[in-house]
Amino acid sequence: MSLTSDEVNFLVYRYLLEAGKCFTHAAFVFGCESSVSKAGINGKEVPVGALVSFIQKGFQYMELEANLNEEGTDVYGEYTPLTARDILVKDIDELRVAVREMKEAAQQEQQDFLAAGPKDIPDAAVRRLAGHGSEVTSVTWCPTSNLLASASSDGTARIWDLADGGGGGGGGGGGGRVAVCRHTPQGGAPVADLTCVEWSPDGQQLATGATDNAVRLFSREGVLKSTLQGHRGMIMSVRWNKKGDLLLSGSLDGTLVVWDAKAGSQQKQYGHHTGSVVDADWRNNTMFASCSQDGSIAVCKLSDSKPLRHWQGAHSADINGVRWEPSGKLLASCSDDGSVKIWQATAEKPVHSLAGHVGPVTAVRWGQSSSGKCQLASCGEDGSVRVWDAEAGACVHVFNEHDTAVSIIAWSPDATYLASGDASGRLLVWSLRTGGVVRAMQVPAIIYDLRFNRDSSLLACCTSEVRPILVADLRRAA
């Protein structure tokens, strides 16, 4: 199969038209000189962005070919991404040499790191935040400051002020101002366990979900602003849209509710899932995805009463999470069936079905490489952490230092580190450049949650036992 000159000319002409006012005159001149109107191509059948899409796929093919072994049957070593500039100026033989050299350099660097061994985070670099009376289920950093919020089974959320950087050493309560967000039970009901917590994008409000079926909104000072009731089951997730005016909650009752945060009222309810809603995530200000124990994933738009896309049987077992990549182009999901899948809202089938984990995959998180390339991390009960090239659908790193199930992972915002925590309480910080462990810490309980702060200097974790929240200062651990 090959493109004719007429077809190439048409694609170039369409690209110039789609570029807008900048190339209007150029498109007219090119269309006349190349006689595009006589090519006999129905423009309505050619998708928008066709030329760019073909070029990107060609680049991906070249990158994949450069990574194949001499027999062309498998990828040699770990998949090595190439820059667009390399692919643009080098032929396939030169690209293969470049890939081999990068692999050899990375392997040598990793061997040097492994020989030195991971550096334990010293006690002096860890702040301990004591105060909760039961296990802490979730932690989250304020996006605009070093305020850390925590949710606990003791019926409270707490807001910890770590504005000084959080370096205080071992023992003690960690210092700093603490605001307690109390969830007062109604009608003599028992104190509710908190299941989730999330800051609004502007850092001014904190949303919590609890086992009493209610969502609550607090100010950053810990003052209760609204109690949102509408679910008939415990809250499994709360998510703010990017604008911060709407809050999405998913529940064990199988429904999702969109709340007007300012008015403190319900805007819309969805009941398209037949099982418990496990997770949900906003694509933008008006669209979101959700997943359920019924094995389905749905994409909804606020202006529509029914899902735009409902992938029934998206996975063959319980789905554990969904996450949109930052641009909203791709959606990732993970499941107890051992697979990770990448979807597009416009497609009926997954773009990639990523195999490699043996057993349930517990979490997926989006990040990027040091060169800015979109990547996806996953972790599983097999004890492995994997990093995938999202566009190519190839595994670029496999981390196998954990001996038990990995429960949670977190990217550092500066794309330098990936942190992982397991069921034995082992916390590891990986270098995304070398693939080696650069920091390690052992805690005596299952790690429930891990979060980097906005400048990647602090790493907070909470565990399954009544213990202080730990905040490691990675600058002092160097």
Image (cartoon, rainbow, N blue to C red):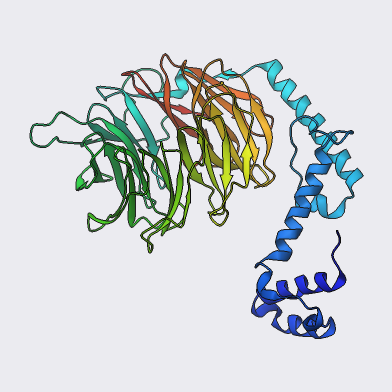
Quarter of the rendering containing residue 213: top left
Query: Which residue is rendered at x = 74% and y = 80% of the image?
Result: 27
Image height of 270 relative to 78, above or below: below
Q: Residue 256 location in percent, x, y? A: 33, 48
Q: Give the percent coordinates (x, y) of residue 140.
A: 39, 37
| Residue 214 vs residue 372, the one in the foreground | 214
Q: For the point 71% across and 62% down, which residue is it?
A: 52
- Reply above or below: 375 against 286: above
**Occupied quadrant, residue 379:** top right
| Screen quadrant of the N terminus | bottom right
Assign the C terminus to one quadrant of the image: top right
The number of callouts visible is 0
Query: Which residue: 66% across, 47% down?
Result: 391
Instruction: Say which quarter of the image contains residue 51.
Output: bottom right
Image position of 257 (left or right of 113): left
Nearest the eye: 399 or 57 = 57
